[in-house]
Image (tube, rainbow, N blue to C red):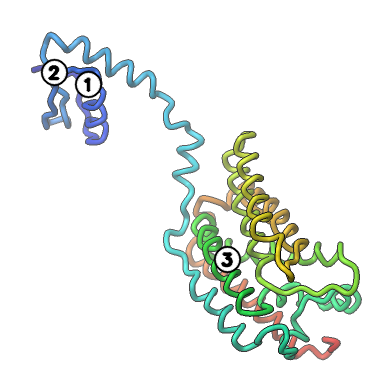
Amino acid sequence: MIPVAVTPEVDLAHLWSLVLHAAGIRHSLRHGEAGLQLLVSEENSARAREELRLFAEENRNWPPERAARVEREAIVEKAPIVLPVMGGLAVFHAITGGWESNSHWFAGGVLDRALVVSDGQWWRLITALTLHADSVHLLGNIFFGGILVYCLCRHLGIGIAWFSLLLTGVIANAINVFFHDDPYHSIGFSTAVFGMVGMLSGMRLRRIGGWQEMVLALGSAAGLLALLGSSGERTDLGAHFWGVTVGLLVGMILVSLGLAGKRALAPGRQWLLFAGSLATVFGSWLYALYSPWKGW
């Protein structure tokens, strides 16, 4: 038996072994000073080398560099903290109650077009994201939102993910208000949930590219919008549509700026940005409840 190939990589050695096994060439692997040696009989050595050469030539550019780069850079944070924030939404709903309660929380925080446009009550673009009409509304947003924000945090990091999510929800609410007539009222985290659908689709579209990926990304976003966001008595289709649309743009911008799929910020700065996003929500509620010119 003579060596026809040697490598220190165990996986590559076993791959060579599979190639020769598929070609019907008897062989063995043996540990040597330089690594694992692939041994064959002398009469089969030329054939074995040719099989390995053809295998290497056929797989020279595999996996494609673009796909390998995407896979390598995809995960930023392996175990992001999502449950406490989703739990916070549930606790907040227990405090505020549903829309029928007519509490001061809804009076000060609901997205009211007339008050936003005429009185400049900008905080409602943010506070409305944290209010829910009832428990069913809340649980749907927590379930789907929790899954989506977990994926988003893994690709962006906890700070960039929550900041982008909040920004997307606010912009989508603002556009939706602009295109509605009075009276118009809206509440719920679902605008941000569909914003995350758009962001994940936009990130995939911009990072991988190609018309197939464009169809897949846009089709998946449109499919989820049609399946989950276009039916129901209280469904705000405009909020969901603008959430997806703004999310697509934000996702593509994040990839263009190099903020997706890589550690663009140190962990400390990610947590600082996350804390700043939470502080923005808390600050908006303080303004809604205690502002002297809140107008209600």
Quarter of the N terminus within the rendering = top left
Disc 2 and disc 1 in contact, CB within 8 angstroms? yes
Residue 54: name its quadrant. top left
> Where is residue 23 shown, x and y percent of the image?
24, 18
Q: Is 208 situated above or below 227?
A: above
First reached walking from the N terminus: tag 2 or tag 3: 2
Which amino acid, by three-letter code, is at mark 2? Answer: Val
Q: Secondary structure at mark 1?
A: helix
Quarter of the C terminus within the rendering = bottom right
Q: State which mark lies toward you, 2 or 1.
A: 1
Q: Residue at x 16, y 30 (%)?
A: 36
| Residue highlighted by disc 3 | 145
> Where is residue 155 shown, x and y percent of the image?
52, 54
Q: Secondary structure at mark 2?
A: strand
Which amino acid, by three-letter code, is at mark 3? Answer: Gly
Q: Which mark is residue 40?
A: 2
Q: Is 180 situated above or below 263?
A: below
